[in-house]
Amino acid sequence: MIDMSVVDLSRWQFALTAMYHFLFVPLTLGLSFMLAVMESVYVMTGRQIWRDMTKFWGTLFGVNFAMGVATGIVMEFQFGMNWAYYSHYVGDIFGAPLAIEGLMAFFLEATLVGLFFFGWDRMSKLGHLAVTWLVALGSNLSALWILIANGWMQNPVGAEFNPATQRMEVVDFAAVLFNPVAQAKFVHTVSAGYVTAAVFVLGVSAYYLLRKKNVGFARRSFAVAAAFGLASSLSVVVLGDESGYTLTDNQRMKLAALEAMWETEPAPAGLALFAIPDVENRVNRYEIKIPWVLGLIATRSVDQPVTGILELVAIAESRIENGIAADTALQVLRTDPNNAEAREAFELHKRDLGYAHLLRRYVDDPADATPQQIQQAAWDTVPNVTLLFWAFRFMAGLGFFFVGLFAVAFFMASIRSCSFKPLLWAAVLAIPLPWIAAEFGWVLAEMGRQPWIIDGVLPTFLGVSSLDRNTVLVSLVGFVLIYSTLFIIEMGLMLRLIKAGPYAHDGHGAGAAPLAPGAAVPAE
């Protein structure tokens, strides 16, 4: 029997280290492209202020990049330390994109970032610009491979279980690579990173404008952030809609849970704007719905229903029973690989083998499970409805807020009037919000997959290493302390650099350096 305390502690450890790591990733993704845009303007115009902008925001990018690398290394080792059976069971598929990402992050990206920082006076303008664009491309391609791996966990295509090796193995790497869930997650995640960077640059620029320091620098940075952020925030909304559509085909339980949809919704399904989910009685209190919206998002139609939790639990119960037949046949094949009858039974039901594994939380042999245990395991496929319901609404609400913020900022920058204090204060106060939205997004993605570590294939509680509770607890506390220290150091460095300003290295103090020739502040 599984020690669930070890499972829970292992999950907490990975969740905390992943969420710490993702504090740095979005800013890296977005700032890299903003640096490329700024340096492109510098190369085209020759104006020194655009070089100053690239170097200042590049310094903040560098601090953030270093912390991202430092916190990301540990995550990859955790697969072997805390999730050994998971690594054994699916390493044939999961290991390839993870290895490619590691090579890109620690060789390609690190080399290019080094050239970016130390190549200003050693390379031609066009050569250095090419490096900056390659840094942006490399950062985003690195994220692509991680999200291909994560997308496979959400939608395990291109792989099959091999009874001879007792592992999942690749049968179509192209299917893994072009997994629609992975592609939707990639474009949505990187767009969210662009929004994060745009809000950060917008907020810091607004801070300078409020203090009337580095005004010319801040105005240009504000304008770039407003334009970049408006395009990015609009794309996040559109691509988030596409992510919702992929759930209909691949993760219907997640979709039903984030909508707290207990009963199947007839077409066209409405979207719950507000509700208080009553999980015990499986109903929603004080529900307010917007007609048709969910049907359009989830099915791209007005004539298809959206399946509810109760019906999906019934389907899971049926799949568990089929999985028991597959597991029984597999046990015969272990002792008699040439048994044709067992082979036929396994091939017929192998798609549901993972559902039989849900019973191992209650019995050693799924064939010994009682009807009550089968029903209980079917209800285990329902994730935390209340958490998902509110995480989605907070994330979506912040997404629409960013669209409004950037629209107003873009308008004000277009008319060269960046002194509207309510907007500037809103930009400063909004700085932490993209990170909150991003963390809610990952909670939604990962908690929505539960109880699966590989959706429909391997339950989370079976993926852990054979460790005792105290070992995992000590390492969890150690990681929290170390990562918290790193986060405090990073915040201290970033705030110190921001306070000093872009011209501190010139010896003039924050905001005291004169603008370069040709970089006059535009009139309002």
Image (cartoon, rainbow, N blue to C red):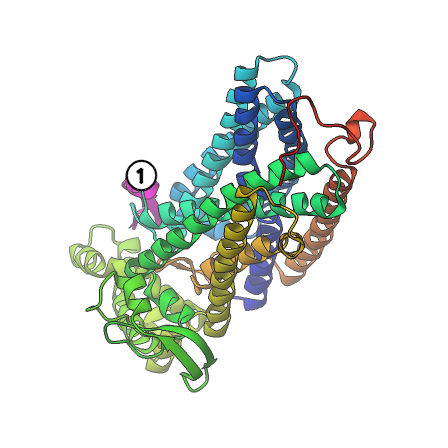
Whether 165 is among the magenta residues is yes
Residue drawn at x 63%, y 12% is 122
Rendered view: 72 above or below 108 = below
Left or right side of 374 for 278: right
Residue 105 x/y as whole percent: 54, 33
Residue drawn at x 35%, y 78% is 262
Residue drawn at x 27%, y 40% is 172
Residue 429 x/y as whole percent: 66, 56
Q: Quadrant of the C terminus?
A: top right
Residue 453 x/y as whole percent: 44, 57
Q: Quadrant of residue 257?
A: bottom left
- 137 or 210, which is in the foreground? 210
Left or right side of 371 for 208: right
Residue indicated by mark 1 = 173
Secondary structure beneath label 1: helix
Residue farthest toward the front in the current orientation of the protein: 523
- 86 or 140, which is in the foreground? 140
Rendered view: 454 above or below 132 = below
Residue 117 seen in render: yes
Amino acid beneath label 1? Phe
Density class for disc 1 (Cα within 10 Å; few <14, some 14-19, many ≥20) is some
Residue 132 x/y as whole percent: 54, 26
Rendered view: 134 above or below 20 = above
- Residue range corresponding to the magenta coloring: 160-177
Whether 367 is among the magenta residues is no
- 158 or 329, which is in the foreground? 158
Residue 369 seen in render: no
Residue farthest toward the bottom in the current orientation of the protein: 281
Residue drawn at x 28%, y 76% is 264
